[in-house]
Image (cartoon, grey):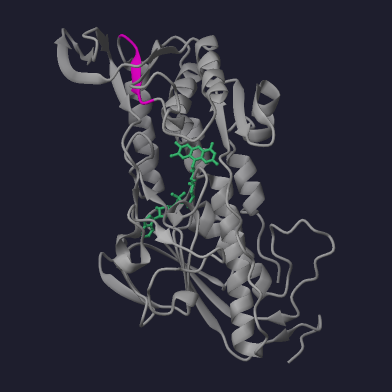
Amino acid sequence: MPSNDGVRAVARSFRVLVIGGSYGGLAAALNLSDLAHGRKYRFDSNPDTKPPSWRIPLQITIVDERDGYFHLIGAPKSLACEKYAAESWTKFQDIPALKSPDFKVIQGTVSKVDCSSKIAHILDTQTKENRTEKYDYLIAASGLRRVFPVAPQSLRREEFLEEAKKHVENVRTAKDGIVVVGGGAVGIEMAAELKILYPEQKITLIHSRNRLLSSEDLPDDFAEKALEILREENVEVILGQRVTDTTAVDSGKSRVWRLTLANGEQLTTGLVLSAISRSVPTSTYLSPEALDEEGLIKIHPSLQFSGNVPNSEHHFAIGDLAAWSGIKRCGGAMHMGQYAAENIHKHMLAECTGEKPTFKSLTPFPSVMGLALGKKCAVYSPDEGTRASEELMDGMFGNDMANTICRNYLRLAESPKA
Ligand SMILES: Cc1cc2nc3c(=O)[nH]c(=O)nc-3n(C[C@H](O)[C@H](O)[C@H](O)COP(=O)(O)OP(=O)(O)OC[C@H]3O[C@@H](n4cnc5c(N)ncnc54)[C@H](O)[C@@H]3O)c2cc1C
């Protein structure tokens, strides 16, 4: 039946279950809702694209362990600054873009997905009871499990604000400075951010290899630029030394830590922050057939599962949890979310109209990285090589570690159109 705008509605409705309401999951849910309403999807900047000519009744259920959207990129800043913490976590119920009957949000942990019956088992945080959700399409966007202080461990906004408050107090009162262990992207950003927020604190970054970012597929000149900027900003950097021992020492009223390095050198510090632990895929709710040896979900370029699981064409994986090339990034997660939305929409239309779907194919991601290093940002891409400046910082991260940039891109503050 055509509506006033000439857009017809298909005869059936669909249930979509999104596991994870962060960059990837929200990008998929919001773009899919746009398309289902006969609108161009929100990430589409091409003025010549025509909106879809069908409406598709949808129920999109988002399940997340957290009670809101958390800006993970900004964690090095939000955990160390209470004002920024408050801006970086928004409860799902307070996000205007989700205020539509299309969306239902469950705070809970998905414990098992049965791909053959298309049922997800969820431990509901509020009721503490197990519940099930049936779906027609599933989007796995639950990312990697990260430990503190790489990511906060709180699942509720109020708890997170307390967690940040406690961390701020520890950082502020640390005697003999703070040591960050691990010179990967997170450790580097953590050290730089602490120095900017607490210039009076001595901040030391220790990395076991002779080069920062040693486990990333990035050129030496990018790692050297990051080192140069850290030193310019008065972060002490120790390279090529593993921390072999960390012992608590009571020095009168306060407790400090004595670190021993591989060369026998010792240093004392008031706070040790570890940025070395490996993040673990959250895919334990899926059968091993869906996963690669690291636990990431195997996908086709259409984002559909490529492992040997039933109904694989109705199962999509995006973001950090998907086995795909390139360095895992929030931009990549949102881009995958958009592609999953487009391809699910095409698949739904095909089921209703018999039209053969032509899926969008994801191309390999190159190794790209942007590092927020206090006042400056360093960026590497294969096309433009290594660049670094304060202007780049403005464009890439603004003054809030890209919190506003990501929210605006997802259009979280916009209420859904009728
Ligand atoms: C400190 C830090 C700094 C970073 N800086 C940058 C940067 O500058 N630029 C950049 O591009 N990228 C950066 N990244 C990487 C970027 O944050 C990730 O690539 C991005 O978060 C991936 O998004 P995602 O949606 O796939 O997963 P995530 O953002 O990890 O979200 C997964 C969601 O799923 C939920 N979840 C997990 N398990 C379950 C479950 N079983 N049931 C229900 N819900 C579940 C989680 O609560 C979470 O909300 C950074 C990462 C970190 C840790």
Query: In the picture, which quadrant includes the N terminus?
Result: bottom right
Which of 298 and 88 lies nearest the eye of the viewer?
A: 298
Which of 67 and 139 lies nearest the eye of the viewer?
A: 139
Residue 192, percent across and down? 48, 21
Residue 366 drawn in magenta: no
Residue 180 drawn in magenta: yes
Q: Give the residue displayed 64% in from the left and 66% down from the top.
A: 360
Q: Is residue 46 left or right of residue 165?
A: right
Q: Is residue 394 left or right of residue 46?
A: left
Quadrant in the picture for residue 376? top right
Quadrant in the picture for residue 101? bottom right
Query: In the picture, which quadrant includes the C terminus?
Result: bottom right
Q: In the picture shown, does residue 236 fall above or below 385?
A: above
Q: What is the number of callouts on the image? A: 0
Q: In the picture shown, does residue 135 fall above or below 404?
A: below
Q: Residue furthest right?
A: 48
Residues rendered magenta in the picture: 176-182
Residue 245, percent across and down? 18, 19
Q: Is residue 194 visible?
A: yes
Q: Is residue 111 visible?
A: no
Residue 20, percent across and down? 44, 58
Q: Give the residue displayed 40% in from the left and 38% down from the top.
A: 161
Which of 7 and 336 lies nearest the eye of the viewer?
A: 336
Q: Is residue 7 left or right of residue 85?
A: right
Residue 365, percent across and down? 58, 48
